[in-house]
Amino acid sequence: MSSEAELLRTPPLISFWLSPRQTIVRIVAERPRYLVVPLAVLGGASGAATVLLDMGIGTDLVGWRGSAGTILGGAVLGFCNLYLFAAVAGWIGRTIGGSASTVAVRAVYAWSQLPIVLGLIIVLAVLSGLHVFAADGIASPARSPVLQIVQGIFGLWTLVAALLMLARVEGFGFGRALVTHLIGSLSAPALLALGVRTFLYQPFSIPSASSAPTVLPGDYIFVAKYAYGYTHYSLPFSPPLFSGRIFGAEPQRGDVVVFRLPKDDMTDYTKRVLGMPGDRIQMKEGQLYINGSAVKRERIADFSGVDVCGGGTGPVKRWRETLPNGVSYETLDCVDNGFYDNTNVYTVPAGHFFMIGDNRDNSTDSRVLSSVGYVPFDHLIGRVGMIFFSRSDGTDGGAASVRYERIGTVVR
């Protein structure tokens, strides 16, 4: 009795490590919302950081930019998962005979994050120490097994704590707790990701340099799905459930967009909208003409450091174009008198758009009628909004590394 009485007087942040089941009963009975949101947010940030460590870029978390991005994104996911998990797992628990309220299930989810948060603190402390004291930097292969073991231990601890606490508040056995937790933990992130991906933002990666320097190979971008409304291409796997666009809105000239290739509607392309329905588009000596008028452009400093032309990282001619509506952006000119520097006049059909990559001599786009051609309005996926991550692959002569300066860049 004395030990139980002492446990009841111990702060929950300490008693959790001694007896998670008794601690959660006490929390639910006295203060069911105590620290729920902060712990869920910290748990989400820790989970995101763990994923990055597993991807082999753990040293980047020592930098403040990597830490800030991880904390922000993980915090949002942790907050959303808190409520989605409680809704799904709470319903499953009640269906199979449990008695816990949704508030109690939220408390279980939040407090079960404590081990993974502690695990991340330990891992980051080790990484920081190696970063400070290692003479030649941090040797990733040497530390990886140790860090993975640490992550695995604390991840397993998090799962066990969640199951013990969930079984206690629901009033059923470990087996039903496991079923409830698995369904909730798998369904909640899936529902969240599905909703965000379908209606708000979809992530894409950039594999080629066809739209350089605006987006580069290794950039990861968010595309706003709502910008132009929704078609069946907005849905996962693009089932032909309906035709046309819902809440449709035409893109503006100069928007950078992702669209489905007309010749192969399973392939996504990223280009800039330069021709609107009814426009006449032509290239003359490398300069863009819209409806017979040359688009203003001025030469700026050469571009270098990334192989965007397939011939090394040397300097490439760079121009700044300004469209009639005031949209301004940079283009590259890999070679003089390139294959598509002089073209016939393209007349954009009604309901279609003309797309050109900013890397003018290294882009397969609407100028190639046999491959891309005019893009139907229904094939637009969305407008490119922001670069949320960027990493060079090391093929440009240097080691693979995170391009911090590109993270958070708004694409225009």
Image: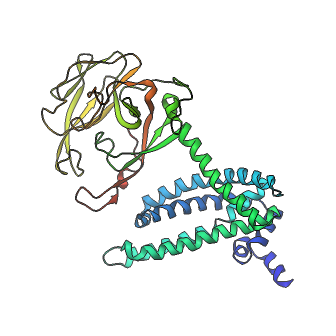
In the image, farthest residue toward the right: 1
The residue lying toward the viewer, choosing from 144 and 26, is 144
Q: Is residue 22 left or right of residue 393?
A: right
Q: Could you say where residue 407 lies in the image, as x and y percent from the top left? A: 40, 51
Residue drawn at x 27%, y 16% is: 291
Q: Kindly indicate the quadrant of the structure image that contains residue 139.
A: bottom left
Q: Kindly indicate the quadrant of the structure image that contains residue 58.
A: bottom left
Q: Could you say where residue 215 lies in the image, as x and y percent from the top left? A: 33, 43
Q: Image height check: is 28 above or below 308?
A: below
Q: Kindly indicate the quadrant of the structure image that contains residue 7.
A: bottom right
Residue 227 visible in the displayed image:
yes
Q: Could you say where residue 368 lies in the image, as x and y percent from the top left? A: 26, 28
Q: Could you say where residue 249 lies in the image, as x and y percent from the top left? A: 49, 24
The residue lying toward the viewer, choosing from 286 and 361, is 361
Residue 80 visible in the displayed image:
no
Q: Which image quarter holds the N terminus?
A: bottom right
